[in-house]
Amino acid sequence: MALAKYYSLYDKVYKWSNLQKAFANVKKNKGAPGIDHVTIQNYELDLEDNLGVLQEKLRTKSYKPLPVRRTYIEKEDRGKKRPLGIPAVEDRIVQAALRQIIEPIFEEDFLPCSYGFRPKRSAHMAIDQVSAYLKEDYTYVIDADLQSYFDTIPHDQLETCIRKRIVDGSIINLIHLFLKAGVMEDGSVKEGKEGTPQGGVISPLLSNIYLHQLDELMTKRGHRIVRFADDFIVLCRSAKGSERVMRGIKKYVENDLRLTVHPTKSVIVNAEEEPFTFLGYEFYRNYRGIAPKKEKTFKEKVKRLTRRNQTLNIEVLVDDILNPYLRGWANYFRFGHVATKFKKWDAWIRRRLRMVQLRSWRNRNSLYRVLRKKGWNEESLHPIRMTAWRSSKTHMVHTALDNSYFEEIGLVSLRTIYEERYSKKNNREEPHA
């Protein structure tokens, strides 16, 4: 049965209620300003007038997006950075308004194997599906890396995919404007000839629309594919089968989709013999843990946040700086075999905080004052170096800054977050500690 095509959508994009909702979502997601330096807070100061002007520009089709501001974030690969494109606030509002109208249309088509940046779907669902396939003996894993995917999507083929469902020329033209807006870097603008820069509100949807073709092909051929945006794996039951599928993927991706399969990062792994990583998790047989690179990143970040040479209020450090990071990280990785590891890291984090407090106190009389309040007599107190790492493990310091103290100031416990998953009524399988 032919899919319905949508002819009249453009007026829904600039509908007042849709623009208001779009701004609310942009504000919620925060984000830095674009090349015009207008922040979300600046835009909101005169929100009604700003949205009114924007609505009129869209209605008269005089709206034109600004080039995105190029910035880079560190990748886990040493020395490499990931390029991002930061649109202006007003452009983010229009992209959000557009996405709110067209996303439900494409959601009708997207397949269950796609999990990234979709309503009511998540990375954890993708991870669970991988575990389920491994249990069904699909242990030969094709990890096909798409090189610079977001920056290399061919515009003409992407727009062809969109036209299969949307015939409204004004919508197509608005998407075209975003694709061609270009990127500003070092004061000069580079024309947008291909790609949809990461950082844009509409980019995740456009990337899913384009790779939906791959989902359809793999599903039609009966292959087990799990995809999160441009990160995907295909699981097979035999070595020969996986090699054949890998050749097919490479041929289709490069010849039909005009993308590039990374020559060295794309591999086939037998999960019964060696581990593989997907979405930050490491899989090996029935084990599901944290990828070593993610562990390293976590420890380095905690060390930076709790560096010993800082003097500050430890409660402020915990509440404003450390807790948000620990909470987000633990909530993502609590669905692995991490109970013992989380308990060990909790102790390590407390020790680092004890060291921060010793350094902040500077004078050991501050430590003695706390111990006296806890009933210690003068004979029990002895000299201690307030800047020595080994001091953070002494009985005196553990008594002054015991575990109950950290509970009182609200320090996030990784192990507690891990255990909370069992108190919630969900249908996930519970990995053993």
Image: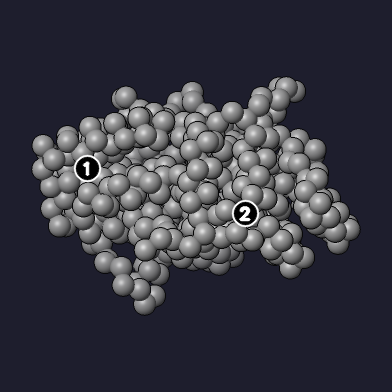
Separation of marks 1 and 2 at Cα, in angstroms: 41 Å
Q: Nearer the viewer, residue 201 or 301?
A: 201
Q: Nearer the viewer, residue 433 or 352?
A: 433
Residue at x 26%, y 52% (from the top left corner)? 220
Residue at x 11%, y 38% (from the top left corner)? 239
- Please determine whether, in this image, residue 4 is positioned above or below residue 333: below
User: Image quarter for residue 318?
Assistant: bottom right
Residue at x 79%, y 55% (from the top left corner)? 59
Please state which amino acid type lies under the numbered disc 1.
Answer: Val
* Residue 365 pos. (x, y %): 63, 50
Q: Quadrant of the C terminus?
A: bottom left
Q: Nearer the viewer, residue 110 or 188?
A: 110
- Give left or right: position of 154 versus 269: right
Please state which amino acid type lies under the numbered disc 2.
Answer: Asp
User: Image quarter for residue 336?
Assistant: bottom left
As helix, strand or loop, the secondary structure at mark 1 comes to strand
- Please determine whether, in this image, residue 367 is positioned above or below residue 104: above
Q: Residues within 10 Å of mark 2 (few under 14, many from 20)?
A: some
Q: Which residue is mark 1?
A: 141
Q: Nearer the viewer, residue 22 or 332?
A: 22
* Residue 262 pos. (x, y %): 35, 28
As helix, strand or loop, the secondary structure at mark 2 comes to loop
Q: Nearer the viewer, mark 1 or mark 2?
A: 2
- Give left or right: position of 154 versus 112: right
Label at residue 168? 2
- Any part of residue 140 in sight: yes
Q: Residues within 10 Å of mark 1 (few under 14, many from 20)?
A: many
- Give left or right: position of 413 versus 366: left
Q: Quadrant of the N terminus?
A: bottom left
* Residue 58 pos. (x, y %): 77, 52
Disc with the residue nearer the chain's start (1 vs 2): 1
- Any part of residue 125 in sight: no
